[in-house]
Image (cartoon, rainbow, N blue to C red):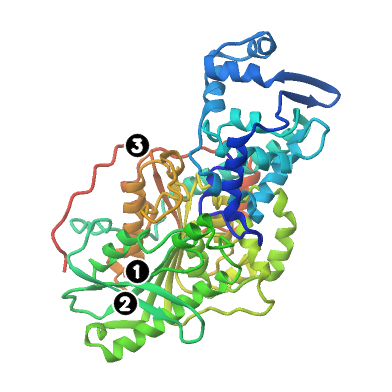
Amino acid sequence: MKCLFPSLSPAVCHSLRDRALQYLGLLAFTAVCTAAPAIAAERIYVTYGPLEVSVPIKSLALFAEKGKIDDHLDGFAQYAKPEQLAQIQRVLQARAEIKVVTIAQFLYTPQGEVLLERLGRVIQTKAQQPGFYALRAALILAAADPEGLTILNVLRKFPTYGIRIDIDRGLGVAEGLTTLVNRSNRAIAGVAQLSETPDAAEPAIPPGEMLQPQLPGPYTWQKSSVTLASPNRDRTFEIDIYLPNGSPRSAPVVVISHGLGSDRISFEYLAKHLASYGFAVAVPEHPGSNAQQIQDLVTGRARDVSEPAEFVNRPLDIKDLLDYLTTLATTDPAYRGLDLQRVGVIGQSFGGYTALTLAGAGINFAQLDKDCQLENDTWNLSLLLQCRARGLERKQYNFSDPRVKAAIAVNPIVSSILGETNLSKIQIPVMVIAGSADTVAPALLEQIQPFTWLTSPHKYLVLMNNGTHFSTIEQSPQSVFQPPAAVIGPEPALARRYLNGLSLSFMETYLNNQSKFRPYLESSYAQTISRDSLGLFILRSLTPEQLQQLLSSSSPLSMPRLSTPTPEPQPVPARR
């Protein structure tokens, strides 16, 4: 069950089938309230080759609810340690707070159906038929039941007399996941170790001139919001603009693109931080892939989590935004200090894709066609979104914008939709940020390996050890899905400070040509602020051959640890 719950986040949930799902939750709830299921599972059959054993579900319920082990479970329990039994008891009763309409909507999306198909190979009916439809019914009925969505309740609602679990198939699924985890761990540990290798070419921080780029800058700022109508598309969208007050220089522009299911609030903290250092910051909200879209989906006002067209609309939103600001810079005195020839783009997840398309990478249909044949067998959940782009009209899409001089992609989803051929075309400075615990866009597949395809002479791979897909996102009150703390990961406030400092140093270096910020993009500086709870590692170079060597090496690899605790940063006087 756990593998389903993170997948309900907006970062993975994508389009629906054309059906009236808004009524499904109500119908399921009515059915539960008015009558018991005609058939409900009574036993679980576990098969391994020719061997088969069975356990009554009521025995599992007795153990889960009262901790009692009857004769049916005693033969299994004697092989488990007390702490393992306690864990199983907790897992059986762990309740996912997901509304019935939300789970019903998700299970009818292409992504939900892929996961059901995979689970259905392992969890079958007693007659050895795939459990696809039975699982979907059980999950919806359990979510509608007052006892809620627990593993035990899903077992009770399974609409056949028996549930068959095929251990052979289960081991095959587990082996694929284990292989990915092991390879990812080796790559992540290898990147961390390589980042700690001293580099004589790294610029040093002059004695007595230590800056603290993760702390707020000296300038105040003003925020305004506008609604922009695209001149060439039937589309309007909201923009928040942050203008610094009193900066003596012209202001480069940084655009921040949120991820799927997020909004303008998600990176408001980053916009304010950059504005406090004299950058003009524009934060568009992408309709069709924002928090409101997910809300509309759940309430039945939208049929799809995100249409394939959003792969085109998102970069065009930013192009329209830059055109709009260019006009304002010549007509409105408040905007005359903007320099639209020095633009940086920062994007997270779907926004990371958006940033890299503007940096010069186009959609790679050939790679999508190749990789999406394996969509049903991959543990790369981001592929479920990327493969939706195959629904676009087949033509060459070029979103590259010469005004964009630098790009940061946080947890980007790009391995197939952009691919090696197109990522190698990017020539502007690029920073790719990965989280080692990202289960939505796995670090190895979506950031580390794609980083080896980049040919830009100015590129950075940043790894947050223990970072997740949600570490840097500020939770918005508009969000339908509020990830629990375990999904967000450790120290999100620290992750946001890391992003503040990295983004500022990167944009100062490559938009403002401020060389004094360059040392704050190096691994030696990262080591001084990194913590074991959320380690920070920076690598400037990694070739495909080096990565392959890390993955195939037989020598053990482990994550470096800090030798001394790192103190909290303290505010410093204004530097300008």
- Horizontally, residue 270 falls left or right of residue 354, namely left
Residue 353 lies, with reference to residue 375, above or below; the image says below
Q: Which residue is mark 2?
A: 252
Please identify the quarter of the rendering in which residue 71 is found. top right
Q: Which residue is mark 1?
A: 507
Amino acid at circle 1: Met
In this rendering, the label closer to the viewer, 1 or 2: 2
> Is the residue marked by circle 3 packed among few (<14), some (14-19), or many (20+) residues within 10 Å?
few
Q: Badges 3 and 1: C-beta atoms under 8 Å apart?
A: no
Amino acid at circle 2: Pro
Image quadrant holding the N terminus, namely top right
Give the mark, 3 or 2, whose residue is nearer the N terminus.
2
- Horizontally, residue 570 falls left or right of residue 528, namely left
Q: Position of residue 127 (x, y in %)?
A: 83, 32
Q: Which residue is mark 3?
A: 563
Pick the front one: 33 or 162: 33
